[in-house]
Image: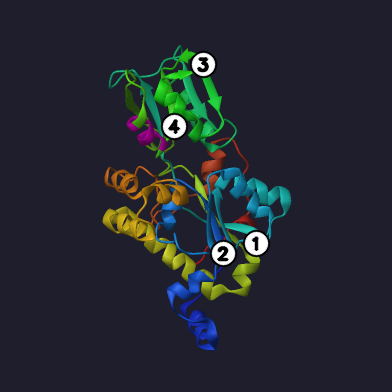
Amino acid sequence: MTKRILISLLSIAFLASCGGGNSSQTEESDITFISPTGAPALAFYDQGNNKNYATNSTPSLVLAELQANYYDVVVAPVFGGLKSIKANSADFALAEVVTGGNFFLVGVNKEAGELPTSSSYIVAFAEQDVTGMVFKKLAQEKWNIGTENVHFVSGAADTLPILKTGKHASNQVDFVLTAEPVFTNAKQSKDEGVTLVETYNIQNEWKALTNQESLVQAGVFVRKSSLNSKPNKMKQFFVDLRARIKTALTNQDAVKTALHEYNEDVKEQAKRFGFNENLAFNLLKNGNRFGLVSPDTKLDVNAFLVSLGQTAYSNDYFVTIE
């Protein structure tokens, strides 16, 4: 990401003096934004009562908002988002990556340390997206097991019943590529006699293969016209976003408290965010298993895409808000 839209503190002060305001609550409330539930929604854990924040459990519907004319900010898969902008000449650009890999290969009824082979029955998801492409590259180039026995389902949510039962299309499964919080949900609700063990942390495996710090998963896309029409408000939006992510990575109690303050009913929390306060606390406490990307980590999106055999995007597809 090399193209920069620099919004200086002096310009913000000037705009505020002209009626823009300087309260983070006021500034951010004027920005309309949407994210999928699950890991990307953790970056907005204290926004449950913000009427301008929407969530959707179907990522493809969130992605479609890049072609609409409502939201100032859309959090969507980076690969799919960039493709959509290019195909539809959408008025958006990628500002930041917020999640970088909450994927795990899980052994079903396996011993700890038991690894997949070319004859293992494996279920993975999102074959045509980053998840599937990363998995195939690791299978072929790092684990040397090929992909002939890999069976793909649509999304991470589709792996939940497979993990719970240990079966796919009436076949006994050996390994499942899944994501958090699906993995933890499965461990808590699996059928009697089914055991689940973490075999690979995909983010760690990817770094070992490519030396890249993280996968490139969900990104924050901003409407270019909104950057021009309300730069101070957009600046504050990103100040708050980065602060929230840093808090989530260092203060799990604050996340739990904010979710509880939104709604004491854990079912309502899960409906809004895709996780509840207890699940968020435990997954953050046990090693950032949501895969949040620290604002201090700068990822090279094009290098990641090229490593997957994809075409790099020009600077027009990226912005940096400072």
User: Seen in the image, is 46 located left or right of residue 29?
Assistant: left
Q: Which mark is residue 178?
A: 4
> What residue is pinned by disc 1?
70
Residue 134 drawn above or below residue 35:
above
Q: Which mark is residue 32?
A: 2
User: Seen in the image, is 44 located left or right of residue 169?
Assistant: left
Q: Which mark is residue 80?
A: none
Q: Nearer the viewer, residue 300 or 255?
A: 255
Sequence-first disc among 4 and 2: 2
Camera-nearest label, 4 or 2: 2
Residue type at the position of mark 1: Tyr
Sequence-first disc among 1 and 2: 2
Crowding at label 3, few (<14), some or many (≥20) Cα neighbours within 10 Å? some
The dominant secondary structure in magenta is helix
Q: Secondary structure at mark 3?
A: loop
Sequence-first disc among 1 and 4: 1
Spatial CA distance of label 1 from label 2 is 8 Å
Residue type at the position of mark 3: Asn
Asked if the residues shown at circle 3 and circle 1 are in contact, with their CB atoms under 8 angstroms apart, the answer is no
Sequence-first disc among 4 and 3: 3
In magenta, the rendered stretch is 182-188
Q: Residue at position x 51%, y 66% from top?
A: 321
Q: Nearer the viewer, residue 146 or 189?
A: 189
> What residue is pinned by disc 3?
149
Q: Position of residue 192 (x, y in %)?
A: 32, 20
Q: Secondary structure at mark 4?
A: strand
User: Seen in the image, is 202 located left or right of residue 169?
Assistant: left
Spatial CA distance of label 3 from label 1 is 43 Å
Q: Position of residue 203 (x, y in %)?
A: 40, 38
Spatial CA distance of label 1 from label 4 is 32 Å
